[in-house]
Image (cartoon, rainbow, N blue to C red):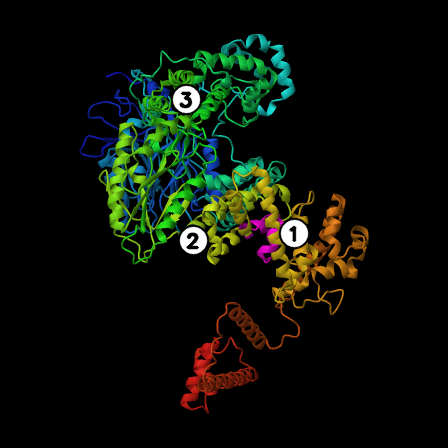
Amino acid sequence: MLPLSGKRPSGARLSISRGSPTGVYSVRRRWSLCQKLHFRDQVCCVQRSPPHWPYLLCSSCSAMPALKILQLNVDHCREGQALALQAAREHRADILLLSDMHRPPENNGRWAYDVSKKVAVVATGSYPIQRVWGSELRGLVAAQVAGITFISVYAPPSLSAHEFERLLGAIELEAASHSRVVVAGDFNAWHEEWGSGRNGQRGIELLQTVETLGLSILNQGRKPTFIGRGFAASSVIDVSFASREIVRPDTWSVIPFSRSDHELIAFEVKQPDENPAGAQQHLSHRPQRSTRKNPAGRQHDRCDSRRWKTTQFNRQSFRVALRANNFQERAVSHIGMIEALVDACSETMQRISGLHKSPHHDMYWWTPAIKRLRDDCLAARERVQLSHDLEERSMAAAAHRTAKSLLEKAIRTSKRQQFQELIDIAETNDYGTGYRVVMSRLRGSPGPPETDRAELERIVSDLFPTHPPVSWPVSSDAPTTVPSDSRVEPQELLSIAAGMVTRKAPGLDGIPNAAVKVAIEEYTEEFCRLYQDCLSRGTFPPQWKRQRLVLLPKPGKPPGESSSYRPLCMLDALGKVLERLILNRLNRHIEQQDSPQLSDAQYGFRRGRSTISAIQRVVDAGTAAKLFRRTNTRDKRCLMVVALDIRNAFNTANWQAIADALQSKNVPSYLMKIIGAYFEGRKLLFDTSEGPVERHISAGVPQGSILGPTLWNMMYDGVFGVGLPLGAEIIGYADDLVLLVPGTTPTTAAAAAEEAVAAVKQWLLEHRLELAHSKTEMTVISSLKQPPEEVFITFGGVNVPFSRSIKYLGVRVHAHLSWVPHVKEITLKATRIVHAVNRLMPNLHGPRTSMSRLLANVADSTMRYAAPVWHEAIGNQECCRLLRRVQRKSAIGLARTFRTVRYETAVLLAGLLPICLAIKEDTRVHSRRGTGLNCAIRREERQRSMEEWQATWGADAANERASRYVRWAHRVIPDVGSWQSRKHGDVTFHLSQVLSGHGFFREHLCGMQLTSSPDCTRCPGVAESAEHAMFECPRFDSTRTELLHGVVPETLLEHMLQSPENWSNVCEATKRITSALQQDWDETRRELAEQGAPRVADNQHNQDNDRTSLYSARNTSEEQRGRRHPTPSPPPRAVGRRAEVRSLGERYRRQLLVVEERRQISGHSVGGVTSQEDGTLVEASRQGMNGAEKTAATEADVASR
């Protein structure tokens, strides 16, 4: 046994006690509780080395990389949770375990939480969450990070003994299935083993569970983790456990926390995959904490380390740099061209130093002032704990409450200020940081990228399978020279450069698209010569066959699964230009109008064959099936629609199948040769914690390439020639397939569908493709009243049941071709977008209307997707109501109007097109596709929409039942076209009040029952409307003289559209007038609040009668509007009975008033009457009534109360 390097400290009393019959002992010190040591074998539980004292640690242990974990009970406080996240940044923690938290963020890849959203595992460092194990049990969540399973637990005191036992059983079941586990949380369990002053039943049961699992207790000392609250004394109820092989002794500590009754707990565990092979056999005196800024291995070079800041790109400077680097002389080969472009980029742009910022930066709302308030709060809490005198303790507690209140207020204020900055950014950059922040609530915030090499290699192996070598067909007798009509021309290259998107991620060479565009425009002949040489020789440079892998997590998918990522391949821009040249020549061959080489049933990645066309073909087939009568048993009146999905389709495309398809379609030999070179020797590179890893590719078409989708179509075209049952057909879009199988009954259609699916599956297997059975959906479109719920199809041992609707290419197709489910789905999605975007558009701040309209169009585009397919839905009142409701919310936020403004006025002020008119317009444009230029067709149809809108706008105002607000809006904006096509002017909060009539005008406020009278305070007897305040009231004569220059309502629009100056003057006038009216309204409310008087009319003496008449008139109006017959009047007997009851109740109340007057005369106050006296007086008030009258009086009294 080797000696220890440390000495026992003087004064430290040690006691060794038997912990369990398994030979595990616990070593105690007076001031702390150490780790458990195996004294029977005389080995350390950490490194199997001789035992050491608790404060000692092997040097090999201290040198190992560790994970820093923080643990906290947030006490269901929002600000406490925010401070916990900031503490994780300050302590550079990798994991944060929360219990009794406030609320987790939505769609955040760093968070894993339970069904009750009470406990969470948060990846606060550079390690992503690799797995999440959910459970229906509340208060328990398990997630794997860096190969360790973290289990966060919260067991509130309210749990019964049976519920606590179930929780322990779930913990044992979860922890037993993993070798490296950390269990931590607030168990509300007491036991001396982790520092409590007593043993409770919960603590005994928890300790038994921990010993069964073989976990070590990490708690040290007796410092309380719960500081106490009210009658609850301080205690140790937050406990941490870990597997012995990952324990780092003497790292568990308690840190004061300012905004919770629980303290912050910090400890470390070892990374299991980073253990050194040969541990040193000597010990160090003190454990060495990990001082890394990034996890081990993160300092390696990255695949995308060569990148430049494209925001610094300048076209003129780049042209000068190209000439200075002798681009024309060096561009004789692809290598010289790449080097010249790289040198020019380095001279004109800075390199991006850190592609991924540190996850341990401060929270966005953190400021030095908040830090000082947090320190003050901690100091105030410490004074409370140190106070012994009752009066002194009360004063300290009051000071602590004040400090907490100031801290919380400062955090909320800082968050509001930061969000206001996002709004200010949206003023200049509509799709900038503010837009990304609010949309992240919908799209989700991805967690840190996975960098573990073993995990990445597993994912990459699943996504990119290995196929046998390809025997590429090359015809020796066919000429391989490029035809004269297929030579690279300068105009073609310039057209390709013009279509390149500048904001695209570059490939491995890092050269941005903007640089390639300028280089092609400046040296077109050099590029033509280089690319022509590649086509002539049939070579594809190897530098352009390397692809950088980027794994994008799919929203809502479980982490760690290969199918949860969307693999994108970043290719060099120069190689993409060559791909475009090859694609242009390939399309000339396969897309000939007289003899097309691809099936008519194939859509996607083809000009003029969009998703709308594919969906419309399915809908047309379903419509034809519905035309047959229900009682007809001969015709095929049932259409079974089966949606199939190919598993990992593009990455498993077989190259041999692509080669055979190209050869079968007689592709020219020079294209066959260069496409063969395109596939030969392809490499995939991806980043890991150990540096970049290179992998050879033998299958698939790169997702992100120009040529890949068309090559997929060539290979996939064979599936449309599979033999199917009579009448069945296949519709394809990219890798999505849908089978249309008609039948006389659902049963016969199901039998034919199974045969068709079997044929398709066999073709896929022959081409090394696989169906995703779990994603297969099926429905039956027919005119049957009762849906065939019992029908299902079976293939591959999987039963696919009938569904009322299926989702195909983003459209919900119903069994009866009802579009209500689809409209409900898209409006729900659009509503979430509207709520998120409206946060950037407050009334008095935020981006201008012209820029806000771009944000609002996001929701409109969501609702208008594939509108030509389901445009019939606007004939349904429910669908129209749903669509208008969403657009109205968007328009109100965009135009900054009051929420009482009607839909038509709000949409007009916002500058939007009514959604139903927009859907009709999209349908007309789609029906005219191919008959002319798209922009010209859209312009003509937009004019038709404006004419229809103008007719509706005028008819609404001319209706005799139109409200005064409708007529007023039509007076000030009579011409819809002029308003929508204006070249200047934004609608402000104040201008929208005047144009809509809904604002701080007493007429409008009185209609909402917020003021006592609609009359103007300056002009008695005259209603204070928008017209009166803006154009008539003498109170604002000076404003009208200065800014309006004799404008009247009928000439307001013409005056505003004459010049931007006139528009600004009108906006300033509306601001002055409405601001003054708002101040008057605020003053009125303040006076009423001080007087304690209700806001009712002065002449409203009989409130019950007025309220009854108001409700009666409103009910009558609603009934007439709904074209329903009014409710019949009650019979005379009921009328008499109700009148008798009311009279008896009135008599009873008068007698109670008499009794009250007698009380006051006798000197008794109301509060001084006892219950016995009160009962006697009430009983006396009922004297003189018979039994029926007393019963009626009692009923009336109960009803009045």
Question: Element type at marker 1?
Answer: helix
Q: Quadrant of residue 474?
A: top left
931 is higher (above) or lower (below) than 346: below
The answer for how far apart the CA atoms under marks 2 and 1 are is: 31 Å
Q: Nearer the viewer, mark 3 or mark 1?
A: 1
Label located before the other in sequence (3 or 1): 3
Q: Nearer the viewer, mark 2 or mark 3?
A: 2
Q: Residues within 10 Å of mark 1 (few under 14, many from 20)?
A: some
Provide the residue designation for mark 1: 976
Q: How far separated are the C-alphas under marks 2 and 3?
A: 47 Å
Measure the alpha-carbon separation of dots 3 and 1.
Answer: 56 Å
Q: Which mark is residue 477?
A: none
Q: Residue furthest left?
A: 21
Q: Pick whichever, 1028 or 117, lies toward us.
A: 1028
How would you classify the magenta stretch by its main secondary structure?
helix
Which label number is shown at residue 687? 3
**Label 3 Cα neighbours within 10 Å, binned few <14 / some 14-19 / many ≥20:** many
Residue 820 - label: 2
Q: Quadrant of the N terminus?
A: top left
The answer to whether residue 781 is seen in the rendering is yes
| Residue interval drawn in magenta | 888-915
- Amino acid type, label 2: Val
The answer to whether residue 909 is magenta is yes
Disc 3 residue type (three-letter): Asp
Callout 3: SS: strand
Answer with left or right where residue 441 lies relative to residue 970: left
